[in-house]
Amino acid sequence: MTTHFIGTDGLVYAPGNAQDVGKREDQQDSFGFSDPNDTGLMAHGGMLAIVADGMGGMAHGAEASQLAVRAFLQHYATKQIGEPITQALGRAVEAADRSVFEFATSVDLARDVGSTLVAAAFAPSGLYWMSVGDSALYLCRDGSLTQLNHPHTLGAKLAELVKRGVMSPEDAAIDPDRDALTSYVGAGGIAQIDSPGEGLAVTAGDIVILCSDGLYRALSHEEIARIATSAADAQEAADTLIASALARELPHQDNVTVLCVRITNQESK
Amino acid sequence: MFNSISTSKPAITPPAFSIEGDFTMAMMRCSHGHFYDAAKHTSCPYCGVGADVVEGKTRRVPDHAAASAPAPVAAAPVAPQPAVPAASADPGVTRAVYRDTSSGISPVVGWLVCVEGPDKGRDFRIHGEKNFIGRSPAMDIALTGDESVSRDKHASVAYDPKHRVFWILPGEAAGLVYLNEQMVNTPMKLTSRDIVEVGKSKLMFWPLCDDTFHWD
């Protein structure tokens, strides 16, 4: 991929994206990047990347995630130069929640239709994110993978109970609801959000990955890191990650969406 | 309909972000924000419905199941599942859970009910110890509809389980909090049907725990 976004800090951000329906009948994941021609927004809000994984039967999940992505991109794009990035991300996620909630209410499926959402803003002051649900944001640095956001699943809550000694690890591991979401957009109010107060400093060589759960349920962190690191560019990384997940031939392979952003120095690209 | 990525000469000192590409691959960004290779696709492969032929192989936009395996996908969840590990009813499907994991840890001890303001009619649970009130969805008591409430920690309500009393405390944010029309500067005790006012919202306090009922 030879499309790049160049930051004031001299870093070059190269995006890539790929998606597959997996073994589902329909694609309920949505994604998007902000408009690179909007140079005003780029200057203070940076490049925005977003993945949303819809829930709710049939077409409703797809519609929910599309609405979430659209509302988020639209509202982040209205960010003014003086508005803090964290505040703009907060506005955008509230708008996404409202948009999906209105849709869910209109089809009489409030509380049954919703979407996860993970958005990353690659700004001059660092990497910011807004996450609701179980879609993942990874930083791949020096060949190893770190998850930046905290998943909102019952499993994550049960892990806390295990840590406090209230629940046994065995009981937590076999809970049939452990993958179910404890927070999502579209409920008309968001139970939990994950967003840093300050930007995370990124550096040349870093690869940032946003994905739906279809990726990390098929591939281990080590595999994701190895594939992303060995790819020639961000688009190849995204394509190879999808292909590797599908190659597992999991009987219930979910929709899978991967966005990669590779960061390099201007001279080394 | 599509915004093409400009193929300008390399920027020297870009004022902010700029975009460049080369002439060998025409990267396009569709109106939904997806990037794709315009040399391979006539329209965005992530927006279209149906198959899109890519250099001799078919890139599936929907339906992976039909292409790879004839039928057994749908039958799998019906088959008896092994006891351990327990599987979800439909593995891999994104869904929410409404189970209250806090039970046994931090049970509800009272409520605030919005009686005036944008969230009128909504009730908010009060749990043990401090409960922060604010507009952010991350707050314990999140008045998301009231723009005049501070995002973070406008005020807090605390339950003291040792003495079974409730307190209203001023927050760290700029906004003021009133208890029965009186400004809250220091912690003040709450009693049943007290009115807490933050921003444009009035919240009626309802205790569950007192001397006659408590969890411990």
Image (cartoon, coloured by chain):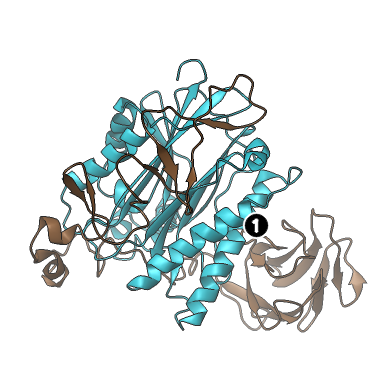
Residue at 41%, 52% in the rendered image: A135
Is residue B92 toward the left or the right of residue B116 in the image?
left
SS category of the residue bearing label 1: helix
Instruction: Pick the residue in front: B211 or A111.
Output: A111
Q: Which image quarter: residue A102? A: bottom right
Q: Is residue B96 visible?
A: no
Q: Quadrant of the N terminus of chain A?
A: top left
Instruction: Pick the residue in front: B86 or A162.
Output: B86
Q: Which residue is mark 1?
A: A91
Is residue A47 toward the left or the right of residue B61 in the image?
right
Quick check: B127 above or below A243? Answer: below
For badge 1, the amino acid type reads Arg
Residue A222 percent across, percent down from the top left: 29, 34
Q: Residues within 10 Å of mark 1 (few under 14, many from 20)?
A: some
Furthest-right residue in this view? B182
Q: Colour of chain A?
A: cyan
Residue at 20%, 41% in the rendered image: B55
Instruction: Pick the residue in front: B90 or B180.
Output: B90
Residue A69 percent across, percent down from the top left: 50, 57
Q: Which chain is brown in the rendering?
A: B
Residue A240 percent across, percent down from the top left: 26, 37
